[in-house]
């Protein structure tokens, strides 16, 4: 487990340690929120593909073996979206939740849709094309033992399906349907206002960027400058922020290098 | 600000929003809808994306200044922000994290299980024409399964396990506490709203859990929850169920 300290502008009263994988999906949410707030944190990179998150030293911190987890002084915090709200409220720095209570409701509504409905569909596809193939060449016995160590039964099922390519056609088709609908919903919502859930940059945008930053690459026929100009405008605006650049620089795999797709105009594959 | 709350029998999401509204002393026009027959899908706002695609399934809808809001925990947070009544979330960020973390586990793990078991024991009934109007394809599919009486044995077993896990968590949490977050909060309301109907359906989960049993009674008789329960037309609100959140598709 590697450990680095990233010093940023403000030092909190107690030290912050974040256990995370790549700036992507759930790990990237608290990473980017901390960086937007200018909170210095000690970064513990857990290699998801080496199952670091199921090793005893991490399970001592988060017995569920899910990533990310944050330590703040003596406190242990889990659940990436709830951690982001904590980071926003606990530390000084730019406010990442809007002032208006109805805007705050909209931020939470969108985060739930992304966390519980759209995100799992994106990740099923992502696990099939990236995570599964990345680990499936390992020693079969070692993989089997790694699966057995996963504390949550639901996660054991997910890993087994990803490693052995067991997602059914029906499951993948349903995920693709949700991804297509989710893209249409995001495009429609982003036509209403500059940011996803309110007129100011918020946790909903941080959450959404972690989910969707590679869309023009992963779903070129559904998301491009012609079909979804508002999604592309929104992703590029978030990518242009210094905190996002600093955050994505912490990535170590090809997964997060996909973010550079936002540096070029993008047209649909043949469409 | 003018508000209209469309709600069903005081159970599940409707109970959460009604009890929060009363606790926060917020004035709203209350409009009864029959969630068990899918009447929410006849509302003028039914096809708005943030109504049609609510992860919660069939729940209350609060309309504020023309905007239709769904998802009971987040409506409760909104009401907590705007109402003059006593705060329903802790003031410190860590206590607020605990509340949101607790409610997330409740909505993601317990609510789908409770709704599945509730619909199995007390099936909601929507006619075919109404099912056609349901904007979300996956919510419509859940309705169709229930209408056809198709309940998976695996899901029923898993749902009972989830209710056991919830009450074990509550029993442990209430060690030295009267309320889940120390003071009466959204977490108590939301947790009670999903579990009240499970006492009869999964009695073993509540057996030999004296703290949980006492807490259920404490929540039931708290002024705002009692006021919401008094709106019941059936006299048995905990037996009123409609289609809830989806059981996790994977992982």
Image (spheres, coloured by chain):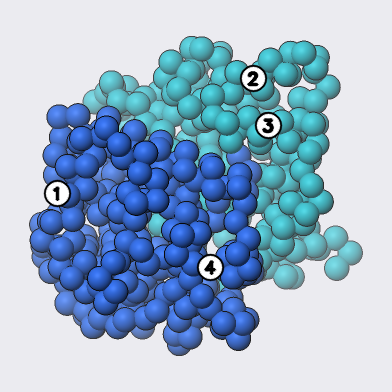
Chain colours: A cyan, B blue
Q: Under tag 3, what secondary structure?
A: helix
Chain identity of mark 1: B
**Residue A205, horizontal then vertical, whole percent:** 49, 54
Lower position in the chain sequence, tag 4 or tag 1: 4
* Residue marked by disc 3: A159
- 4 and 3 marks on the same chain: no
In the image as oriented, which residue stretches furthest toward the right? A270
Q: CA distance from mark 4 to mark 2?
A: 36 Å
Eye-nearest disc, 4 or 1: 1
Q: Are marks 3 and 1 in contact (CB under 8 Å)?
A: no
- Quadrant (top left, top right, bottom left, bottom right) of the C terminus of chain A: bottom right
Image label count:
4
Eye-nearest disc, 1 or 2: 1
Q: Are marks 4 and 3 in contact (CB under 8 Å)?
A: no
Q: Under tag 4, what secondary structure?
A: loop
* Residue marked by disc 1: B218
Q: Is residue B109 left or right of residue B81?
A: right
* Residue marked by disc 2: A148
Q: Nearer the viewer, residue B155 or A135?
A: B155
| Residue B53 numbered mark, or none | 4
Q: CA distance from mark 3 to mark 2?
A: 10 Å
Q: CA distance from mark 3 to mark 1?
A: 42 Å
Q: Residue at x 40, y 23 (%)?
A: A17
């Amino acid at each position: 487990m590697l450990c680095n300290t990233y010093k940023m502008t403000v030092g909190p009263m107690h030290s912050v340690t974040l256990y995370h994988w790549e700036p992507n999906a759930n790990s990237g949410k608290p990473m980017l929120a901390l960086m937007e707030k200018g909170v210095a944190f000690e970064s513990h990179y857990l290699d998801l593909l080496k199952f670091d998150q199921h090793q005893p030293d991490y399970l001592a911190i988060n017995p569920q073996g899910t990533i990310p987890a944050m330590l703040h002084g003596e406190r242990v915090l889990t659940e990436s979206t709830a951690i982001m709200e904590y980071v926003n409220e606990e530390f000084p720095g730019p406010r990442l939740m809007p002032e208006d209570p109805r805007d705050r409701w909209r931020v939470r509504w969108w985060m739930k849709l992304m966390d519980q409905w759209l995100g799992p569909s994106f990740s099923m596809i992502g696990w099939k094309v990236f995570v599964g193939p990345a680990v499936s060449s390992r020693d079969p016995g070692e993989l089997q033992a790694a699966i057995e160590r996963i504390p949550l039964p639901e996660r054991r099922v997910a890993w087994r399906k990803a490693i052995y390519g067991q997602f059914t056609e029906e499951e993948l088709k349903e995920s693709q349907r949700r991804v297509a609908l989710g893209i249409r919903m995001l495009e429609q919502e982003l036509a209403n206002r500059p940011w996803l859930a309110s007129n100011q940059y918020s946790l909903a945008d941080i959450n959404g960027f972690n989910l969707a930053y590679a869309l023009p690459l992963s779903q070129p026929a559904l998301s491009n400058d012609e079909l979804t100009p508002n999604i592309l405008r929104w992703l590029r605006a978030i990518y242009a922020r210094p905190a996002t650049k600093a955050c994505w620089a912490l990535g170590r795999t090809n997964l997060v290098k996909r973010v550079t797709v936002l540096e070029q105009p993008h047209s649909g594959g043949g469409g | 600000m003018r508000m209209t709350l469309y709600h069903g029998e005081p159970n599940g999401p409707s109970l959460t929003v009604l009890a929060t509204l009363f606790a926060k002393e917020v004035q709203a026009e209350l409009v009864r809808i029959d969630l068990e027959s899918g009447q929410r899908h006849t509302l003028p706002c039914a096809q708005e994306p943030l109504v049609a695609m609510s992860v919660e399934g069939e729940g209350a809808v609060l309309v504020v200044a023309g905007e239709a809001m769904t998802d009971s925990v987040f409506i409760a947070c909104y009401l907590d922000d705007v109402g003059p009544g006593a705060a329903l979330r802790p003031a410190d960020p860590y206590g607020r994290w605990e509340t949101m973390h607790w409610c997330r586990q409740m909505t993601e793990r317990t609510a789908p299980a409770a709704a599945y078991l509730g619909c199995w024991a007390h099936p909601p009934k929507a006619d075919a024409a109404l099912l056609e109007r349901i904007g979300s394809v996956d919510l419509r599919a859940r309705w169709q399964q229930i209408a056809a009486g198709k309940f998976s044995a695996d899901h029923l077993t898993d749902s009972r396990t989830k209710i056991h896990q919830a009450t074990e968590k509550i029993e442990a949490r209430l060690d030295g506490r009267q309320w889940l977050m120390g003071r009466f909060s959204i977490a108590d309301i939301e947790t009670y709203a999903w579990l009240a109907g499970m006492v009869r359906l999964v009695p073993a989960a509540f057996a030999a859990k004296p703290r949980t049993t006492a807490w259920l009674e404490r929540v039931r008789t708290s002024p705002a929850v009692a006021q919401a329960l008094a709106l019941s037309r059936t006299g048995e609100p905990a037996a009123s169920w409609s289609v809830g959140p989806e059981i996790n598709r994977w992982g």
